[in-house]
Amino acid sequence: MPETPVFSTAAVAAPHILAAETGQTILAAGGNAIEAMVAMAATIAVVYPHMNGIGGDGFWLVREPKGRIHALDASGPAGALATIRRYRDKGYDAVPPRGPDSALTVAGAVGGWALALELAKALGGQMPLDLLIGDAIRFARDGYPVSRSEERFKTGEEAALYEVPGFAEAFLVEGKRAPEGAQRRTPRLADTLEQLVHAGLADFYRGDVGREIARDLERIGSPITRRDLETYRARVVEPLSVRLRRSTVYNLPPPSQGLATLLILGMVERLNGLQGETPERHHGLIEAAKRAFSIRDRVVADPRNLAHDPASFLTPQALDREAALIDMKRAASFPLPRSIDGDTIWMGAIDHDGLAVSYIQSVFWAYGSGCLLPATGILWHNRGTAFSLDSASRNRLEPGHRPLHSLNPGMAVFDDGRVLSFGAMGGETQPQFLSQIFSRYAEAGMGLADAVEAPRWLLDASLRGQEAVLKVESRFDPGLIRGLSRLGHTVEEMDEAYSGRFGHAGMLVKHPRNGRVEAVHDPRSDGGSLGL
């Protein structure tokens, strides 16, 4: 059932209710939306470990009340020892998804927190770090209940994950997923967070915490060095944007796949006559996603390996050309030889001044590399699995470079003054989910809660071959499914009505007429929205 949206002067939305409560507390104490988000990010890094953690990456979009948009890239580069030759010499055809060889990129999330707090301070923020990180430390020290999502979530290479040394002891109960509600304590992670409060967030890279991380990574055989940590900085980048009829939508530039989300929205707007929940409108979205992913896979990589300016694909002329190639009477062939994985959290916050944040944080696949660093209690991500070992690929593995990144938070500013923060988890499928919830709200006229709750689809790999199938939640209208089938889509209806496989999405909008913030989070998750 759809969540009843919050209407308040300030609000937060998160896929875990403990994170939402943390954000609400910070807003109530006078913190701004950025400070609330850092606090939420710390809490959810503890209580939702299958989806994210301080051993992962993050991306930020922040809109000031006067209109300036800030984009922060807190993704980490490959370690100095992470070369194609190293992996080829070990007999790999691809970067493995689990174990020490998958823990090959620096974790950027904490660096992103630090950079975001610099911006928060410049905008008047004054909250002390001990208050922002306090809930996270308490949950790590005293314990938190295992979530429903963690108990139920399916992930790739699960057997290999369980075999990573130290993983089973930390996360399994009698060799199986911990049951929902089981209490888990992570005292070493609590110690690490307390040290970061005491010494500052830079200690994660250039202090005592960084030294312990480097020792553990070297001990397990990761290609990340101490120098890689010491030289890491999150970056301020120029956001990408696409102009639509009634709004401008923003996202992150490469290595983020934000370009794909903007391409879908820009193309669909050019497909005339698409109304409501019809087969034709969904067909347009699906076909636009296929074209967007083809461009993404050719174009998006580390910024140093780009052959084209990503913004050049978002001009009106370029979008006109792409949209004209969509056949509205027949589904295009779309090979998808791999099943798409990637597990993430998206959260949003808008404060009473109108400062808006869209933030996404991840360890990539569920539980990342599976490598729990013993000295710090940090679970390291496996984002480097997205690299190619083909030296001719633009997304090739190179020390110091970032792989194509699935994380892409959304932000939109409407001509009537509304400001929308929106996003979803879902790995490479995120642009599909973002385009569905945005178009339902902005174009189809759905309310915020209905747009997030409505059944979703995704293009995914087929067990029968390499051609993509269109998987849909069980609540989809049978007539709509028949219509998509007649248009040539191979449709596979899933058993679940509200499946985490279709993303945990959320939206917040600031209404200019009354100054109220409306917020909602996905019933597919363990979270919700809270306001003041």
Image (tube, grey):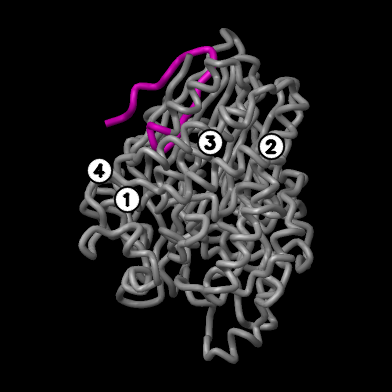
- Would you say residue 4 sits in the magenta stretch? yes
Specify which label sits upstream in the sequence, 2 or 1: 2
**Can you identify the residue that label 2 sits on?**
116
Secondary structure at badge 1 equals helix
Residue at x-position 73% and y-position 44%: 239
**Can you identify the residue that label 1 sits on?**
150
Whole-angstrom CA distance, mark 1 to mark 3, is 23 Å
| Left or right position of 232 against 477 | right
Amino acid beneath label 4: Arg
Quadrant of the image containing the N terminus: top left
Which one is nearer the viewer's eye here, 319 or 87?
87
Secondary structure at badge 4 equals loop
Whole-angstrom CA distance, mark 4 to mark 3, is 23 Å
Amino acid beneath label 2: Ala
Amino acid beneath label 1: Glu
Q: Which residues are magenta?
A: 1-18
**Can you identify the residue that label 3 sits on?**
422
User: Residue most toward the top?
Assistant: 514
Specify which label sits upstream in the sequence, 1 or 3: 1
